[in-house]
Amino acid sequence: MRNVPLVDLKAQYREIKEELFNMWEEILEGMRLYLGPNVQTFEKEFGEYIGVADCIGVGNGTEAVHYAIRAAGVNSGEKVITVSHTFFATIEAIIHAGAEPVMVDINEDTYNISPDRILEYIETKCRFDGETLIDKSDGKVVRAILPVHLYGQSACMGRIMEIAKKYNLKVIEDAAQAQGAEYNGRKVGSIGDVAGFSFYFSKNLGAFGEAGGVTTNDPDIAYMVKRLREHGQKDKYHHEMFGFNGRLDELQAAVLRLKLKRLDKWNERRRMIARMYNDYLSDLPIKTPVEHEKAKHVYHLYVIRTERRDELFNYLRENGVGAGIHYPVPCHKQEPLKELNISLPITEKVADEIISLPIHPHMTDADVEYVCDTIRAFFAGG
């Protein structure tokens, strides 16, 4: 029996090991461990890669989205339109900023936020006075849309930006799973007002632990994020606001710099593996991923759907295939949010059917074939 892990972090490590140890030795000899030359250089390099004026390194992806929300001008008690089909950190970031999530349903083909459902909420539940969008049920201001570029594919940013412009809303991108993904030729993280990235170790661009980043073309937002990540300091021991401790450290920045040089190559391998999966699985009773015509999907995850999800999941695991489920319980069904008592039928249906198959840039063609053969064996009766 072959063993095919969901991700292979050791292979990435081996590829950069020699360069990394040289960089780490230099960092540790100098003992400048945070916001030093590697952080500053990574911020410049990643900002240029995304195509924005500013990148600010922070401690993790949750902080990145949290700081982005605050810096975009979302005030306590205001509402942010987003999705439930995402990792819980998206909702946590909104809550920690003092705001309130308005969760709408997703497109069933891409699993990303549905612009139609955004409009439905705005047109049926809100009023617009020409400057401010207000939820009629409680009089609260609706300040922003927070699309999640889930699984490595951009949300439908063209329509989202049109809606935001019409109703004077900020657009805060959750790009935690989409380093290198594009929409209409532009990198995600450069389209909205501000974006939060996660560099958690399993991401397409991942640290050896936790790290995150915020990207923006707005100098005021960049200034605010820099204050938020370091206790509200303008300079050492001079605090102009209450902030947080959310700095990116030098050791992780070194990892990210080495991996960033390889990101496009690694993403292209992910796309190649996805095409292989699409071809090999096309005749089976499953739904393979749909790539939006304007999007460049970078396949942080390769997610299929089947009504026999739990059976297939167990079979894959029993036969050495490291399948995963992202995410089995939608955010609106989680304990802290149950009191909202909302129904999102597509989100709930998808959550019962999804399986993530192994995909990573060091996966071999033989690994892909084994995964597909195992799936075929399952549908042939095991």
Image (cartoon, grey):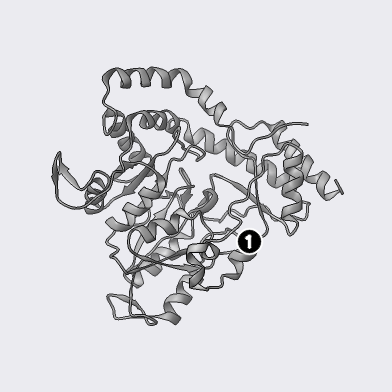
Residue at the disc numbered 1: 350
Which part of the image, by quadrant, shows the C terminus?
top right
Residue for point 63% across, 61% down: 350
Return the residue found at the far right.
381
Q: Is residue 307 left or right of residue 94?
A: right
- On the picture, is 201 further left or further right than 290? left
351 or 165: nearer the viewer: 351
Total labels: the figure holds: 1
124 in relation to 46, above or below: below
Report the amino acid beneath label 1. Val
Q: Is residue 252 above or below residue 156?
A: above
Q: Residue at x 37, y 52 (%)?
A: 65
Q: Name the spot of residue 198 as percent of width and height, x first.
A: 43, 44
Residue 190 in sight: no
The residue closer to the viewer here, 294 or 93, is 93
Residue 250: percent from left, percent from top: 33, 30
Q: Residue at x 47, y 49 (%)?
A: 182
